[in-house]
Structures are given as C-alpha cells and as structure tokens.
Image (tube, rainbow, N blue to C red):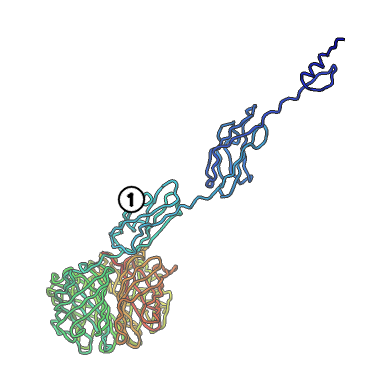
Amino acid sequence: MRSSISVCAAFLLVSGIVVGCGGGSYNPPPPTPPTITGSLSGAPQSLAPSATASLTVTVSNDSSNAGVDWSCAPAGSCGSFNPTHTASGAATTYTAPATAGSVTVNATSTASSKIIASAIIAVNAPAAVTLTLSAAPPATLSTNGTTSLTATVANDSTNAGVDWTCTPAGTCGSFNPAHTASGAATTYTAPGAAGAVVLTATATALATATQSATVTITVASNVSDLSGSYAFALAGRDVNAHAYSLAGTVALDGNGNVTAGEQDYNNGHGTLSPQPSGDSITGGTYTVGSDGRGTLTLITNNAALGVTGTETFSLVVVNGKHALLTQTDASGTGSGTLDAQTVAGGLTQLTGTYSFTVAGANGNNPEVFGGIFVSNATGAFTHVVVDSNSNGSPSTGGSNTGTYTAPDASGRGTFAFGGDNFVYYVIGPEALRIIVVESTETDLGVAIGQGAGPFSKASLTGNFVFKNASAETGAGSYASAGLFTTDGNGNITSGFADVDEAGTVTSAAFTGTYTLAANGYGSIAIAGGATQHVTTLGVYAIDPAINPLDPNNTSGGGGALILDLDAADIGSGVLLPQVASPTFTGNYSIGYRGFTPAGVEQNATGQVAVGNGSFTGTADSNTLPTVGANLDVSVSGTFTADATHVGRFTLPLTVSIGANPPALNFVLYQASTGALLWIETDTTQYVSGSIEQQQQ
C-alpha cells in the first residue's frame, strides 16, 4: 500500500519545527536598531576658573546623523558651551565657571535625547601670582648711589615679568630697566637729594602682586665734605651756670685735621679772651660719619677754656658749607653753627646796610639788642638804630654812630658803637657772626646785609613763620613759634602761635599790625594777647637772597631778624618766608637750645630720618651744670600735621636717656622743605631750635 506525505508535513519535518498546518501565513518582527553611543574627547580633569577646553563627541549608530546637544550641571553655575549643538566629531568650546567647584559636562544625542557621554571636571582656582624681592634693597643708600634689585614672580603662566616704580614720583630716583623678566636684575639709582623713598616691584600679570621697601637716602658724608675756612659761633652756659658766648674761625684740611684758627670767648664773669687779639687755635681734629654726625676738637692757647685749653663739640653736617654745633665737654654746653667763609680775609671793608641782633646777659641780667647799622668804606658806621630789652626794660629807636676795623686774613675784625665793643667773623660779604667783648657783658649774634633795598610794608607780604626765644635761663624763660599772613599793607590778617612761658603753654590764633621803613627797620604788634606776653617784636629786614639759618644757601632767603621787646619776655629770633607746598621727608639735621627756670641748660644736635609721619634718629646732648654729656642718644616720634594751620606739626618725642626715657612735646613750623623751626611746649623746660634738610 503506498504512503504519501504532504508538502506541509515534509517542510516541518525538515525544519524541525512543529506547528499547525493549515492555510495561514507568518510575519517576523522588525530588527532592533543598534544603541546610539558617543565617545568624548578633550575633557580635562581640571580647569582654572573661566578657562576653556575644546570638547568633541563622536557619535556611533546614529543613522540620522542628528549630532549632539551640550549641557552641564549644576545648572546655572557650571559654565557654558559655544556652540551648544555640534555634529558628530565637531568641537564645542567649553568655558568653565568663574568660581571654583566641580561640574559635570554632558553630551546628549539629539536623535535619542539620551546622554551618550559625560565627564566630571574640577574647576580649581589657580595658585595666586606672587612676587618676591629676591634681592632686597638696602635700608640706606647714599645720594646718587646705585644698587641691584631682583624680583621673582611665581604662578605666572604668561611670564609677563616685573614693573619697577618708586615714590615720591619725580624725586625718588630711577630704574634701568624699568621692566624686567622674573628673576632678572634692574639697577636702581638713588636721587641726588637725601630723603625717604619707597621702591615697589609689581607683577605685570597681576597689579595687586607687589612688594615694596623703604630706603633712606643719606648724604654721603665724610671729612672731605668740610674743607676750607669756617666761621663758628655758639651760646650757652658754662659749668658754673654763667652765660657764655664763643665765636671764631677755623681752618679744616679735608682730612680730619684743624690746621689753624682764632676765636673769642666771653662768659661775662671774668673769662674773656685777650683783646684785641683773641685766642689762637693751634690744632685739633674733626670727624664726619655717614649720617653727617661727627665731632670737632679745637686746641687753643688759652688753658682757661674747655678742658685745659681743648674744646670739644658734636656736629651734624647740613651741607658742605653749613653744620650745627653743640659743645659737649665738661666745661660748658652751648648751641651754634659752623659756616664756610666765602671771602674770609678777602673782604677788605664792611660797606652797606646790615640788620643785626645779639642776645645774652649783662652780669646776671638777660639782655637783647638789635637794629640796623650803615657802614662806609672808611671804617665808620654812619648811622646805627638800636632797639634793646635789658632785664625787662625795653627801649626802641636809639641812634648811634660807630667805627670798625677791616677783617684780618682769617676774617676777624672789630667794631664799636653805643658803648659796646664787638668782634666779628666774616662768613660772606653780607653775613657776620658777632660777639660782645665787654668784661661783664656777654652777647652773641649775627649781622646780615639788607641787599639793594629799599624796603616797605609790601616787602613783608604773604605767609611767614617765626621763632623767638629767651636769651637766658631764669623765671622769664620762654620759647615761642608761629605763623602768620600779611596783606602787604601793614596788617596781619591771620596768625597762630605756640608759646611756652615759664611753663604756661598757650596755643592760639592772633591778628595784628606791622611797620617796615625804607631802611628795613620795623615792628610787629600782636593783637589780643593770644600769645601771652609776646606782643611786641622788633623787625629788621634782610636781603631776600640771604638765608639767615644758612647764609651760604641760595634758597630760603629773605625775611627778617626779630627781637622780643616786651617787659616780661627777653628774646631774639628769626622770621622766614613760608613757601607754598613744601614737603617734609628725608634726612634732616636737628639742633636746639633749652633751659629750665632753675638754671639748667641743655643743648643738642643730631640727625633724623623723616617720612610718613616718622621722626627717628640719633643725637648728642649736653646738660649742665647737672647730668653732663649724653652721646648717641636715640630720638623717635610721630609727627602730625595741623589740618587747619598749614605748616604746623605737633611732635611727641621720646629721648632714650636713662631707664625712663623722657617724652617731650614739640611744635614744628615749616618755612620750606629745607627749613623748619621748632620749640618744646612742656612745663619743665623751654627749648627752641631749627630742623634743616641735609643735602650735598
């Protein structure tokens, strides 16, 4: 019997699949598409804030080629993309946020809206750009001196280097070059004038990355700064508390040796250099340190002077033609000056009109007198006008005539008028130091020429500062200083002064009037009593080309010599024009004379560095008849400018003497950058002096 298998059955058997057979059909499902993936490249592990990176995603299995959308988290603070959509393999620029943190960048398939690649990036603040002075400047540098400076910048990816600057601009020196690479040296050259400067290195890449250093520019002093013939003069008290005056001339060889000289000394109590010759200076030595401070020793032929004929002084150089002096031996304490003689014996006659003042004592009574004298070429004073104040009995307008002798080869001469005999020492044609050589009368002073003249009230127009102080110790001791403005027509429109009178201190405003005749003779009347008993001053005008503090200085000239003509106060001083906008910074020589009502006198000279309110330095003092000399004493303080009265400063000053250094109170009045006047305003002593800028 034949068997038969259907087609369907055969197919199923061959296929090994058991299904029902019938008349239906089969439709298989569509294939699943491959998953879209992406490969991210360019993502760094970290970036600096606001830094950029180029990111790329290559997309696989995207048949539509729809590309990539870029995003990040946390939203709003994770940075940005440009563009935010790219084709597969195309780059976007990612910009990190400005603040540090951690962000996630995501690449999303545009076709599937699914993240196909991501990366975490740490946004780290870069190490700050810093700058270090790897070769710091010295604390002090001589005028016009040079030094090499180096600064190193760290973390500067741009390698931009260093910029060099200094202040005060225009007067602080220079750099060569003014820009250097990190670690490369520049040469700094100091200015020609002494002062405090601030040197600054700044990273070019970051203006806030700076390093600064203050350098004190000092006068390059040595003994050669003082060379030639000099006139000197001092006033003070001897070890027996007698007032004394000393004036003379001395020859300095520039190598530290005194080669010759002559002098006159007078204490009004029996010690007077022989007349008419004076004392001979047979030798001596001098030193000058880098800060201008030094010593001067004079050997005389008079064993009654100094210590068995040898006088010792501390000095501080202001410039090569001018120094301040303090006697520091055991025989006496005094303050004064040393000034180059520009003509010495070359001046054959005193001709012209001079203003003068002298101050000291007649016996035990203080006295001052001054005015004007007119001299001719034949040895005569044809006209002398004198104001005086002797022991509180003022008189004005006295008239005299007199005679004089021509100076010798050392610049020493004599003159006489009004019953007094004088010796003078020439500084220049219009500057003389003068000393009274009467046995019971010791006075010291100055005569300064009036120049071409004539004068008038208009000659005293503008702003002025003044200092006026006692000539002697005692109950009437006082010191005063101040400033005022005149209208050129006889009126003091405004003024302010500080007065320490027998321990009573007044600081007050004032007004007043003044006179000034064609011959330079005048007066000041201070109204209202604001300055206690300092109400009437004699005024004697000087050549506008002569600086009364430093007669060889071509700047700061003019003004007047002044006397106090009040019954209660007996003193002398100086009136200086006040220039506009002076500065008060740099190295200054200081000097003062002070005393107490009990008869103790102190004199001092020194050098200080001034800047940004700081006033620090070293001084030598001598206090007699007690204490004696204190050498190399530190002085320090912080001065404050008076916002109302321009040119006035207050200065609490600490002097490092003993276990409990005294704290003293000073007031300063500034005439110019180069000259200030100062007084102490304490109840225990009455001090006045000058502060003068050191210069070459």
Apparent side of residue 238 relative to residue 56 in the rendered image (left or right): left
As helix, strand or loop, the secondary structure at mark 1 comes to loop
Q: In the current view of this chain or complex, which residue is farthest to the front?
A: 1
Total residue callouts: 1
**Which residue corresponds to the image point at 44% horizontal and 54% vertical from the top-left?**
130
The crowding category of the residue bearing disc 1, from other C-alpha atoms within 10 Å (few below 14, some 14 to 19, many at least 20), is few
Residue 504, x across and y down, in percent: 41, 83
Apparent side of residue 669 relative to residue 403 in the rendered image (left or right): right
Q: In the current view of this chain or complex, which residue is farthest to the right?
A: 1
Q: Quadrant of the N terminus?
A: top right
Residue 417, x across and y down, in percent: 19, 81
Residue type at mark 1 is Pro
Camera-nearest residue between 510 and 662: 662
Residue 465, x across and y down, in percent: 35, 71
Apparent side of residue 81 relative to residue 635 in the rendered image (left or right): right
Apparent side of residue 84 relative to residue 571 in the rendered image (left or right): right
Residue 668 visible to an observer of this rendering: yes
Camera-nearest residue between 455 and 694: 694
Residue bearing mark 1: 177
Residue 385 visible to an observer of this rendering: no
Camera-nearest residue between 515 and 656: 656
Image height of 447 relative to 207, above or below: below
Camera-nearest residue between 109 and 542: 109
Residue 203, x across and y down, in percent: 42, 52
The picture quadrant where one finds residue 15 is top right
The picture quadrant where one finds residue 338 is bottom left
Image height of 190 relative to 508, above or below: above
Q: Quadrant of the C terminus?
A: bottom left
